[in-house]
Image: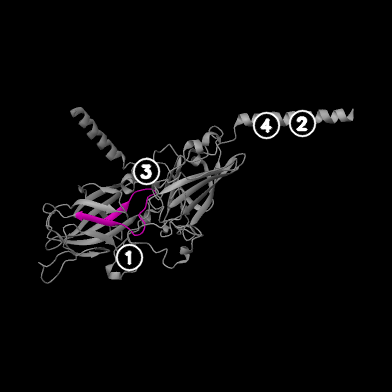
Amino acid sequence: MRLFFSFCFFFMIIFSTSSAYDPLDPNGNITLKWDIMSWTADGYVATVTMNNFQIYRHIQNPGWTLGWAWAKKEVIWSMVGAQTTEQGDCSKFKGNVPHCCKKTPTVVDLLPGVPYNQQFSNCCKGGVVGAWGQDPSSAVSQFQVSVGLAGTTNKTVKLPKNFTLLGPGPGYTCGPAKIVPSTVFLTTDKRRKTQALMTWNVTCTYSQFLARKHPSCCVSFSSFYNDTITPCPSCACGCENKRSCVKADSKILSKKGLNTPRKDNAPLLQCTHHMCPIRVHWHVKTNYKEYWRVKIAITNFNYRMNHTLWTLAVQHPNLNNVTQVFSFDYKSVAPYGSINDTGMFFGTKFYNDLLMEAGPSGNVQSEVLLQKDEKTFTFKQGWAFPRKVYFNGDECMLPPPDAYPFLPNSAKGNLASLWTLSLTVLLLCVHLKLVI
């Protein structure tokens, strides 16, 4: 019995650590860095930096929500570039009232357009943080916090605990804060280096298992060499919304306010057999002598969700020879160095970087031209279709392998050729007999 429980405990540890592991982005995480910049009469002023080191997973609207628990009786006197959602009970303070007195504050980013005196560098984007692989300059968010009742030396300051991150929903697990070497800064004239008085880091990793119990997207296939279209699997994303879905020709779609997002982010899906908010369609379009062409289409079936800064990560062996991508931007992703079989597609700025809600404009598409490798290239056994597909960092459900549109059976082709030859010979014999 003891051996059985030991095995179960070991299995749970392995599962819990592997559930947050992404094989296409093994080092992806969000790192929170606290830099104490100065001491105050009863605490410190710190700059908090959120760096998104995930290659193809970003934080979209309504943005990130950060929380923690104070180690002592700290309060937040003021914030620049962010705010707490609740002030808490500050009745014991006379005169100056803190910004937040809660033991477990919850912090959100400010919206664009706030007054200049409330802004901080890399702030005020509504909590939207881009993916590192898409645009490193937009993959950072910052704010400044003035903490009181916290101690005024490196020895008296206690690190916050129990960090939580919503981005915007569940899925992230944050580790404990760890003291690291102080961050070094370079002055504007680049002639002097300064450093933080104290620095600690918090690392948060993402797990799709924690985020949702069903996939959030699915994939369908088609090809020029087969009339069969392989659809998404039925109820690929669960059918909980089957009763509240809307048919594409429903009169409800003309109602005002239909596309307004709800506070709980509840979707309003178009009725489909797969009931997924997002469908990715991969069509093998053309076969040339030295190249082949694929058409990729992404369709949004959620009437309440626009996707900004969307990303599509695809794993396919021939992505090491991408010749041209016509309507998307493309970046190779090589998490294991020598193995170059993964790429990331994303929208071109001011053209198709916004995937609209369900409807006539709710899709984006592009074609991809790939060069053949004669040693490995073949259309047999579903080779032309991707191994994995991720939309906005979440893995999409693919059809079962036996449903892929394969090449026509070679035996059938031989029979057809034999039948054609026999018919030709028979017609020739009839013709000769008539001539004779």
Residue denoted by label 3: 25
How far is disc 1 from disc 3 in space, using C-alphas? 30 Å
How far is disc 4 from disc 1 in space, using C-alphas? 66 Å
Q: Sequence order check: which comes first, mark 4 or mark 2?
A: 4
Query: Which residue occupies the foreground of this view, 220 or 63?
Result: 220
How far is disc 1 from disc 2 in space, using C-alphas? 76 Å
User: Do we see residue 195 in this rendering?
Assistant: no
- The answer to whether marks 1 and 3 mark residues whose Cβ atoms lie closer than 8 Å is no
How far is disc 3 from disc 2 in space, using C-alphas? 58 Å
Q: Sequence order check: which comes first, mark 1 or mark 3?
A: 3
Q: Tell me residue 163's x, y (percent).
A: 22, 51
Q: Tell me residue 145's x, y (percent).
A: 21, 61
Q: Sequence order check: which comes first, mark 4 or mark 3?
A: 3
Is 61 contained in the magenta span? yes
Residue 412 vertical placement versus 22 (above, below): above
Query: Which residue occupies the foreground of this view, 185 or 302?
Result: 302
Viewer-nearest of labels 4 and 1?
Answer: 4
Point out the image quarter for the C terminus. top right
User: Do we see residue 274 in this rendering?
Assistant: yes
Q: Residue furthest right?
A: 436
Residue denoted by label 4: 416
Point out the image quarter for the N terminus. top left
Residue denoted by label 2: 424
Q: Tell me residue 265's x, y (percent).
A: 35, 58
Residue 43 vertical placement versus 174 (above, below): below
